[in-house]
Amino acid sequence: MQSTSVIVFADIAGSTALYEVLGNERAAEAVTLVVGAMARSIEAGGGRVVKTLGDGVLAVFADGVLARNATAALMRNHAQQMQDWPSDMGLEVRVGVAGGEIVEVDGDCYGDAVNLAARLCERARPGEVWFSASAVPELARAQEQGFVRLGTLVIRGKSESILVYGLEWRQDEDLEAQTVLTHLPSTFGPPPTEPAQLQVQWGDEGRVFGAGDMPLLLGRAPQSQVFVNDPRVSREHARIEWSRGAFALVDLSRFGTWLRFDGQEPLLLRRDSCLLHGSGAIALGVVFADSSAPVLRFQVSDSGVLCKKIALALDG
C-alpha cells in the first residue's frame, strides 16, 4: 500500500564503543532499555513503530507536526534517562526525519523517504534531530516552530542537494533538575580515563590546555588567552569552556564561527555551542574557503567526546 507519510529514523550513537566498555551482556541491556524508551516515546506521540534495528527504531507518522512533537519528546526523555548514567559513557541518540511517499509491504516500509531519513540520521551528530524540508510542517513558519535552517546537504544517491533543518528540542529548564525517567545500575560506569587535554595552534603559537585552564577567550581583546589580531575577528569572538566533562566551543560574535572536524563538512555557529572532539579547525568570522581566514587548529586528547548541539548550520 502506498501513502504519503513522515518517516523517523532514530538510533544510538556510540553503541559499538559501549560494548567494548561494558561487555556484551551489560551493553545489550543498556541498548535494549534505550531502544525501548525511544519506541515508547514514538508511540506516545502518535507514531507507529515499523521495526527496531538493534540500536535503532524506524517509525511512521501521519504528518510533520506529530513527528516534530514526538521527536522532541523522545530527545528530552532520553536526556532525562541519561541523567542516571555516567557522563562519559557517550551513549547519545540522533534522529533523521523525512517526508514523502512510501510503500508498505508485509509490515515493512520502503521508499525514498525511508532512505533519506536513514541518511539524515547517519549525518546528524549525537543529540541532533535533522528534518528534510519535506517533513517540516508549515515551512514558512519553521523558525517559530523551533527549527533552524542548516543549509543544503549532498546525500549519497540523490541527484540534487537536500535542504535540511535542525529541531531545537531542548527546553529552557536545566536538564540536571528534571526527573529521571529510567534508572540503570551504577555499575555500568567505565574505568577512569586520563584527563582530557586541548591542543590549540594559531599563527606561530601553540599551547596545550587542560580543564583547569578553562575558560579560554578567543579574539582581539588584550586579555584573550588565544589572541588573534585580525580586524574581522571580534574582540571577544568565541570562548572555549569545560562543560560536563568536555571542551565546548561557544560563539560570542556577530558574524559567526566556523568549525570543521577533520574529514567532515564545516559547521557554522552563531551564538551557539558545540562540544569539541578529535581534531579539526576553527575559522573566526570568515569562511574556510577564504585563504586569508584566521584559522586555528585544535586537537582533543579525549576523542570520545561528541558534539551535541542541534542548532548548527552547514556551510554552504
Image (tube, rainbow, N blue to C red):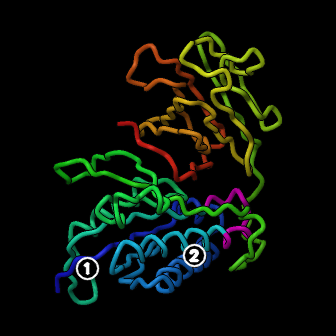
> How many other residues sit within 10 Å of disc 2, few (<14), some (14-19) or many (≥20)?
many
Q: Residue furthest right?
A: 212
Q: Quadrant of the N terminus?
A: bottom left
Q: Amino acid at mark 2?
A: Val
Residue, x 76% and y 64% (percent of image)? 176
Q: Secondary structure at mark 1?
A: strand
Residue 109, numbered circle: 1
Q: Residue furthest bottom?
A: 106
Residue, x 38% and y 23% (percent of image)? 289
Task: Please give the residue where the numbered disc 2 appears in the rendered image.
Answer: 34
Q: Is residue 212 left or right of residue 188?
A: right
x%, y% of residue 186?
78, 72
User: For the residues marked 1 and 2, what is the alpha-carbon distance in whole angstroms?
Assistant: 23 Å
Q: Amino acid at mark 1?
A: Cys
**Looking at the image, is 105 positioned above or below residue 91?**
below
Quarter location, residue 21: bottom right
x%, y% of residue 302?
66, 43
**Looking at the image, is 177 positioned above or below residue 152?**
below
Q: Is residue 235 left or right of residue 115?
A: right
Q: Earlier in the sequence, mark 1 or mark 2?
A: 2
**Which stretch did the figure color magenta?**
80-90
**Looking at the image, is 63 positioned above or below residue 272?**
below
x%, y% of residue 233?
58, 20
> Which of the pair 10/142 is nearer the observer?
142
**Looking at the image, is 116 positioned above or below residue 250?**
below
x%, y% of residue 296?
57, 23
Q: Secondary structure at mark 2?
A: helix
